[in-house]
Image (tube, grey):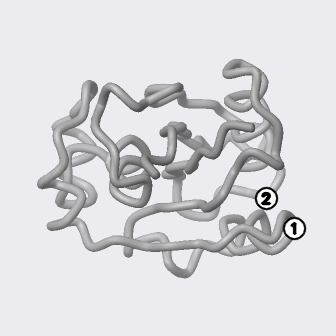
């Protein structure tokens, strides 16, 4: 059974349904199950996002947050200057997944995928293979 880490970024106030749908779509695209996930990771700026906490609780996943400076030091395939302006790091989902998984870009099963929910908010998900 593969063991993976989800890196997640989202618009402020993204609904639980939006984040859950983004995660479900990414897992389906990768041919993975919720049971394959060992943790959720994001940026410290998202520590107060209820949707992230609700998703982690619903599946029993640990939820870890990293400071922007730590995420900015991780090489990712899709850095964004827009993301850097808003968060202080060029990547959230990819970098957070790689950070927790102690992995490199080669371990990304799903590079960043962005979804727009019915609430009009976006969630971005990346999936990294856990480096054990």
- Along the line of sight, the residue nearer the viewer: 120 or 78: 78
Residue 34 location in percent, x, y? 81, 46
- Along the line of sight, the residue nearer the viewer: 82 or 111: 111
What residue sits right under mark 1 in the picture? 58
- Left or right, residue 97 beside residue 69: right
Residue 94 location in percent, x, y? 38, 41
The secondary structure type at the circle numbered 2 is helix
What residue sits right under mark 2 in the picture? 16
The Cα atoms of the two marked residues, 1 and 2, are separated by: 11 Å
- Left or right, residue 59 beside residue 30: right
Name which of mark 1 and mark 2 comes first in the sequence. Answer: 2
Mark 1 or 2: in front is: 1
Which residue appears farthest toward the right when viewing the image? 58
- Left or right, residue 112 beside residue 19: left
Q: Residues within 10 Å of mark 2 (few under 14, many from 20)?
A: some
Contact check, label 1 and label 2, Cβ < 8 Å = no
Q: Residue at x 29, y 44 (%)?
A: 91
Q: Residue at x 54, y 30 (%)?
A: 114
Q: Residue at x 50, y 47 (%)?
A: 130
Which residue appears farthest toward the front when viewing the image? 132
Q: Residues within 10 Å of mark 1 (few under 14, many from 20)?
A: few
């Amino acid at each position: 059974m593969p063991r993976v880490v989800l890196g997640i970024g989202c618009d402020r106030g993204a609904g639980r349904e939006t984040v859950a749908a983004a995660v479900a779509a990414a897992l389906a695209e990768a041919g993975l199950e919720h049971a394959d996930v060992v943790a959720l990771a994001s940026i410290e700026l998202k520590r107060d996002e209820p949707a992230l906490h609700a998703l982690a609780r619903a599946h029993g996943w640990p939820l870890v947050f990293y400071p922007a400076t730590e995420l900015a030091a991780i090489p990712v395939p899709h850095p964004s200057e827009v993301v850097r302006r808003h968060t202080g790091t060029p990547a959230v989902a990819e970098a957070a997944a790689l950070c927790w998984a102690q992995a490199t870009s080669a371990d990304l099963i799903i590079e960043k995928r962005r979804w727009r929910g019915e609430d009009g908010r976006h969630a971005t998900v990346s999936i990294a293979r856990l480096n054990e």
